[in-house]
Image (tube, helix red, strand yellow):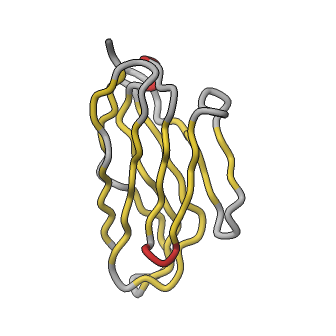
Amino acid sequence: VQLVESGGGSVQPGGSLRLSCVFSGHIFTIYDMGWYRQAPGKQRELVAQITSSRRTNYSDSVKGRFTISRDNSKNTVYLEMNSLKPDDTAVYYCNADVAATEGALNYWGQGTQVTVSS
C-alpha cells in the first residue's frame, strides 16, 4: 500500500488549503482515516478522524474551521482547512487502517508542510 499526500503550501492567516491523501495498492477495505500534524518541537497530534461509516471527530483547536471527508471510490481522504491561523503551521500526515493483500495494517503518509504566515 502506498500513500501520496498533496495540497500543502504557504498561505496567509485567514486563508484556506485542501489536503488530499490517496491510497493505492491491492486494497480490500480502508477503515478509520485521519489527519495528524506535528509542529516543530511538539508532539504529533490528532487533527481529525473519519470512520468507515463517516462519523467524524475533530480536535478542539480546529473544530468549525476544518472538515475531513473521504471518497471510498477513490481511496482518498481530504482535509479542508479554512480560517487558517499561524498556530496551524505544521507538517500534516494522513493515517489509516487498511486491509490489503499485506494484511490489516496502519499506514502513514510522508507528510506535507502547511505554513500559515503573513
Q: Position of residue 67 (x, y in %)?
A: 58, 45
Task: Count all numbered tags in the image, as a single digit.
Answer: 0
Q: Is residue 65 above or below residue 77?
A: above
State left or right for residue 93 relative to residue 64: left
Q: Is residue 57 above or below residue 96?
A: above
Q: Residue at x 28, y 28 (%)?
A: 10
Between 11 and 30, the residue placed more toward the observer is 11
Which residue reaches farthest top? Answer: 118
Between 100 and 90, the residue placed more toward the observer is 90
Which residue reaches farthest front? Answer: 15
Q: Residue at x 30, y 51 (%)?
A: 6
Q: Position of residue 43 (x, y in %)?
A: 46, 30
Q: The C terminus lies in which quarter of the figure? A: top left
Q: Is residue 38 above or below residue 6?
A: above
State left or right for residue 55 relative to residue 29: right
Q: Residue at x 53, y 80 (%)?
A: 29
Q: Residue at x 52, y 36 (%)?
A: 45
Image quarter for residue 90?
A: top left
Q: Position of residue 7 (x, y in %)?
A: 32, 46
Q: The N terminus lies in which quarter of the figure? A: bottom left
Q: Position of residue 103 (x, y in %)?
A: 46, 82
